[in-house]
Amino acid sequence: MSEEPFVSRGFVGKRRGGEQKDRIPPGQYLTDDFPVLSAGPTPYTPLDQWTFTMEGLVKEKASWTWQEFLKLPMQKYMVDISCVTKWTKLDMQWEGVSLDTLLEHVELDRQAMFVTAYSDGGYTTNIPLTDVINGQSFIALKYDDKPLAPEHGGPARMVVPHLYFWKSAKWIRGIRLMEKDKPGFWEALGYHNRGDPWKEERYWND
Ligand SMILES: Nc1nc2c(c(=O)[nH]1)N[C@H]1C(S)=C(S)[C@@H](COP(=O)(O)O)O[C@H]1N2
Ligand SMILES: [Mo]
């Protein structure tokens, strides 16, 4: 990962004021660490074999090589993240491509209502389309001004800051647009289908 021509269109989500405690969802504790949580081994796909694809309910699918993906407009994001294992980390700095930008490259079928993010290694997670558009999610290539570390999902991971962190697929390789919702890896194992930390949507019956 030598080339770093990231164009920045400015900072998104710069911090509103407010007490720190008002930013910690119920049942969460504050941490400065960045724990690693992976359901399997870290995959190492060579960048010259890496692609990112928008597929499913689109007129024509769109696909980018790593070199092409780097040319997409990048933005900086400062966001708070909550993990279902109860840590919350504030003001995490990322840089990446907004899902809105990627969606500009495909024509959605009218029936497209849900997305599945899929990753190297087979991980998937499902999210309603309404939770990923309008600046709510991005594909991160950098964390803390450095290329995203492999254990944290590098070369590229999705980040959906307003949902629990399992919705943020590491090692992402594409997004599938779907008409019907389909539980992803953790959702099929009992995690909540949506995962809003402010509503404590941790498990199926929450
Ligand atoms: N591909 C993939 N993405 C994943 C996971 C995983 O196991 N595989 N774990 C999820 C879970 S449960 C969490 S809490 C976060 C952890 O991200 P981190 O290791 O960078 O803290 O990644 C999410 N994305
Ligand atoms: Mo998690």
Image (cartoon, rainbow, N blue to C red):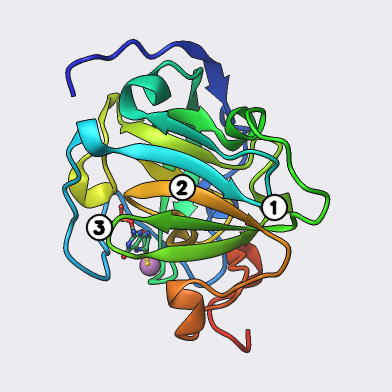
The amino acid beneath tag 3 is Pro
Displayed quadrant of residue 39: bottom left
* Residue located at (44% from left, 70% from top): 84
- In this rendered view, identify the residue nearer to me: 11 or 134: 134
The amino acid beneath tag 1 is Leu
**51 left or right, relative to 187:** left
Q: Earlier in the sequence, mark 1 or mark 3?
A: 3
Does residue 118 sit above or below 103 in this rendering? below
- Position of the N terminus, as image quadrant, is top left
Residue 124: image x %, image y %? 44, 64
Q: Which residue is mark 2?
A: 174
Displayed quadrant of residue 101: top right
Q: Which mark is residue 129?
A: 1
Residue 173: image x %, image y %? 39, 47
Q: Which residue is mark 3?
A: 35
Q: Is ligand 1 within 8 Å of the beta carbon of the residue shown at mark 3?
A: yes
CA distance for labels 1 and 3: 28 Å
The amino acid beneath tag 2 is Gly
- Position of the C terminus, as image quadrant, is bottom right
- SS assignment at label 1: helix
Residue 187: image x %, image y %? 51, 77
Instruction: State which mark lies toward you, 1 or 3.
Output: 1
